[in-house]
Image (cartoon, grey):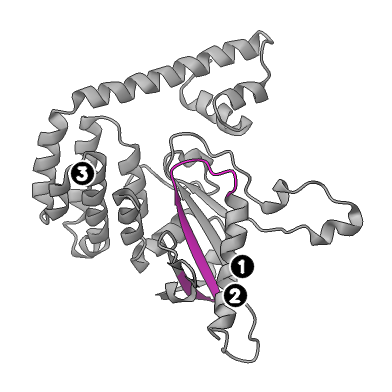
Amino acid sequence: MIKHDIAHKEFYSNPENVKDLIQGFVALDCVSEFDFSTLERDNDSFIEKEKNERHDDIIWRLKWRDRWVYVYILIEFQHKIDKAMPVRIMSYVSLLYLNLLSNKKLNYGKRKKLPVVLPIVLYNGQKYWTAKRNIQDMVEKAPDEMSKYVPKLSYYFIDEIHPESNEKDTVFDGLANSVVAIMKLQRTLSSEEFYKFINKVKKLIKDEKQKLRFETFITFLLRYLSSAYDKPEYEKVQDLEEVIRMVKTFRDYDRENDKEIFIKEGEKKGKLELLTNMIKKGILSLKQAAEEMGMTVSQFKTAVKNLAIE
């Protein structure tokens, strides 16, 4: 597991951050009825006999309404588009259920039913996610009398880099919560943007309550910088003022990297402009242009709009 994934795993090992993730990004009405005071880690339920614990999964459970109905959250950290994701999710949920049954973890009340599972896929790759969201969409159309044998299982998708792809319109103008903070961190391009961002965090944690909430974010920040810039000494820093001084000094020598990022952004806009013109001339369809960019039609339209391409 690379350090960046370790940073994510440590971050989402904190119940406050899991709460921020669900409340801020999951567009389901039932979230308002979740009792977040009951959030507890339950990775012990997901042990593979041959491979031991799955180190890339984080599993929590909490109460819903006034009944002991458990909601399990599986968080997957993906950097590349995985076309097999629906199949993987189905296997993870099945394995979770098998382990719950074998570990006799269903002995609550008379119901003894399997808990509801909410699988969440967190993605932070640069390309727009194009994999199917439901296993049913990967299976050939079945005869009507066989349709009941076709599996149906979706996962909830959250894109850290492209917020327009998410189902919930989360406010990104400020640092609404710690999850928004790490997502903004990963989308920060220039040295100037980065320094402004860190100073916003600095102001936030002057409040004692906010300071406690953002402690895990600071740990994530150090892990992230250590991995991104190959600076192992970053992980040893404990004072935020030192983080700011160190990052500013290092980033001042990182202008060439910033230039490369901006060049790539310029190339992206140029390609979108070219494809938009080809659509207008009837050379390409909207669907073909979107596929060329590795996007869905909706994502292509949003990208064109965001870059103010006419």
Question: Sequence order check: which comes first, mark 2 or mark 3?
Answer: 2
Q: Amino acid at mark 3?
A: Ile
Q: Which mark is residue 198?
A: 3
Q: Compute the Cα span from label 1 to label 3.
A: 42 Å
Q: Which label sits in the foreground, 1 or 3?
A: 1
Magenta stretch: includes residue 65: yes
Q: Which residue is under mark 1? A: 94
Label 3 crowd (10 A; few <14 / some 14-19 / many >=20): many
- What's drawn in magenta, residue-wise? 60-84
Distance from Cα at disc 2 to Cα at disc 3: 44 Å
Q: Quadrant of residue 266?
A: top left
* Label 2: element kind: helix
Q: Which residue is mark 2?
A: 98
Across and down, in percent, residue 38 comes to 43, 78
Q: Position of residue 151 (x, y in %)?
A: 73, 59
Which amino acid type corresponds to the residue marked 2 in the rendered image? Leu
Kindly indicate whether the residue at mark 3 contacts the one at mark 2 (C-beta within 8 angstroms): no
What residue is shown at x 59% (from left), y 43% (from top)? 83
Res. 177 in view: no
Q: CA distance from mark 1 to mark 2?
A: 6 Å
The residue at the point 61 percent across, 67 percent down is: 94
Categorize mark 2 by other alpha carbons within 10 Å: few (<14), some (14-19), many (20+).
some
Say left or right for 156 vs 261: right
Q: Which residue is rendered at x = 48% and y = 20% of the image?
A: 308
**Residue extending farthest top:** 281
SS for callout 1:
helix
Q: How many C-alpha atoms fall within 10 Å of the one at disc 1: few (<14), some, or many (≥20)?
A: few
In this rendering, is residue 36 above or below 229? below
Residue 226 magenta: no
Q: CB atoms at circles 1 and 2 under 8 Å apart?
A: yes
